Amino acid sequence: MHHTQNSLQPLDTSGVELPPGWLEIVEQIAVNVHETWVTRRIAEGWKYGIKRDDERKENPCLVPYCELPEDEKEYDRRTVIETLKTVVLLGKAVTTPTAVSKSDSAHC
């Protein structure tokens, strides 16, 4: 089904504040989101290219997170923050059974 911009109705998370400590994990989750995307793209036959070319399946963002331009990192961060706010808005809780150190998620 084709949706127009006017038919989309995302939840309004503008008034949601993240619980203490959640902003500290945004970067770690953003790294994972990006690396999951890269892994999926490579499995689909995509490869690194200087500019995006859908026909040739090339994309300049098929690099480790730390090598992304800041605007691409910010896109991933915004996605993570919006997702976490949605979890809060839906009344769900996130718990951590074990702590993951920052060095465990950094690959650069």
Image (cartoon, helix red, strand yellow):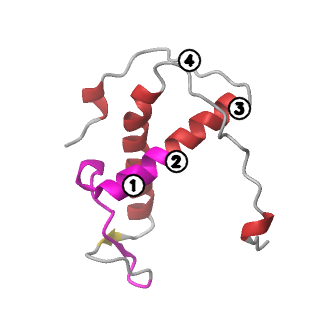
The CA distance from mark 1 to mark 4 is: 26 Å
Kindly identify which residue carries mark 4.
95
Q: Is mark 1 on a helix, strand or loop?
A: helix
Q: What stretch is highlighted in magenta?
A: 55-78
Q: Are marks 1 and 4 in contact (CB under 8 Å)?
A: no
Kindly identify which residue carries mark 3.
89
Kindly identify which residue carries mark 2.
79
The residue lying at 31 percent from left, 34 percent from top is: 105
Q: Indicate whether residue 13 is drawn in magenta.
A: no
Query: Which callout, 4 or 2, points at the residue further toward the start of the chain?
Result: 2
Dot 4 amino acid type: Thr
Q: Are marks 3 and 2 in contact (CB under 8 Å)?
A: no
Query: Which callout, 3 or 1, points at the residue further toward the start of the chain?
Result: 1
Dot 2 amino acid type: Thr
Which of the image's four quarters has the C terminus? Answer: top left
Residue that protrudes farthest toward the left in the picture: 108
Dot 1 amino acid type: Thr
| Pair 3/4: label in front | 3
Q: Are marks 2 and 1 in contact (CB under 8 Å)?
A: no
Kindly identify which residue carries mark 1.
39
Dot 3 amino acid type: Leu
